[in-house]
Amino acid sequence: MHLVRELATHGKRSVCCLVSESRQERARELLEALPESARERVSLWVGDPRSMDLGLSGEELAVLTETVEVIHHCASITDPAGTGEEAAGNLRATAEILEFAEAAPRLKRLVCWLSATVSGNREGFVKETELDDQMGFRNPIEESLHRTELMLRESADELPIVVLRPALMVGDSVSGEAEDLNGMYLLIRFLLSAPEDYRIPTPSRTGVRISAVPVDYAVRAGLHISEDERSIGGTFHIVDPKPVTVQHALHLFAEATGRPAPREHDPLNLATALMRAPGMQRFRNTTRAFLDQLKTDVIYDDTNTRELLAGAGIQCPDLESYVDTMVARARQA
């Protein structure tokens, strides 16, 4: 939705949104919140990127094929708790999008929004140019993203492809708007449900860095990069250039929720506490996937991103500047 809003409110482009039947109502609600001038430029097309011909009729497909100039492929599931079926759907969606792109005579850009977690179990410094599977993956979703990028690289000689790899995304840094309250929000929700004197335990590897980015920054950065001619054929990590450690994030969350700061060395186990907490059982798979991320210490190279964002005035805000906004959104839930 942030992407649609940015595209519709800047410039005079028409924005065609491929929306599944089950999400039509939600899509209309979100569009109603746009200014009228922007809303008039957005059209909803009911289909499914995982289906043949994107789930469109022959006539609808022909119209889009002849008119579309830029494709933003955002249909890939990046939630680490995703199922094997959803992972397979990532590959089907990419295959359909590539087929559509090859048939579009006016195509200028195919922008694929994926995830930095394609690095899987890799630790240390990961370059934007690297696509390595030697260390394996933590879940089927990451493996599907790896295979997706392989498909894109095979088509890069024939199509103007741009690959964007955002880090772990959180809600809007200003408004707090967020559809998904998993990931880092699990820690906040856990603290909010705990007694006021509860001291959150720390994981064994407190120095692991968490590269989270607000969705508003990710979209602004991704759009600016993808509209630059130099981005074609490139891969770009959209990450926090100064990622915080797990220990520092826990301190920030504890302070923002009014709980005591975590101890430096705690005999308890964060994973056990989260998995056993009342009300958190229904997030068991999501929690386990998030904890796996907290065990993997990785730094994402963002050389290509910094080069294309230079002078644009688009900077990733520090977690300290929007942690209260995250907590406020979690309280609403």
Image (spheres, rainbow, N blue to C red):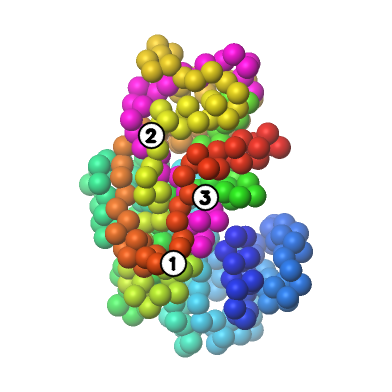
**Crowding at label 3, few (<14), some or many (≥20) Cα neighbours within 10 Å?**
many
159 and 217: which is toward the camera: 217
Which residue is identified by label 2? 245
Horizontally, residue 167 falls left or right of residue 197, namely left
Mark 2 near mark 3, Cβ–Cβ under 8 Å? no
273 up-or-down from 19: above or below: above
For the N terminus, the quadrant is: bottom right
**Identity, as a three-letter code, of the amino acid under mark 2:** Thr
202 up-or-down from 40: above or below: above
Q: Tell me which residue sits at (57%, 15%) in the image.
A: 198
Q: CA distance from mark 2 to mark 1?
A: 28 Å
Q: Tell me which residue sits at (32%, 56%) in the image.
A: 302
Q: CA distance from mark 3 to mark 1?
A: 18 Å
Please tell me whether residue 34 belongs to the stretch shown in magenta.
Answer: no
Which residue is identified by label 1? 312
**Identity, as a three-letter code, of the amino acid under mark 1:** Ala
Please tell me whether residue 205 belongs to the stretch shown in magenta.
Answer: yes
232 and 258: which is toward the camera: 258
Q: Tell me which residue sits at (36%, 37%) in the image.
A: 209
Which residue is identified by label 3? 214
The answer to whether any part of residue 310 appears in the image is yes
Residue 14 x %, y %: 63, 79
Q: Find the magenta span and give its range.
A: 193-221
Sequence-first disc among 2 and 1: 2
Sequence-first disc among 3 and 1: 3
The image quadrant that residue 276 belongs to is top right
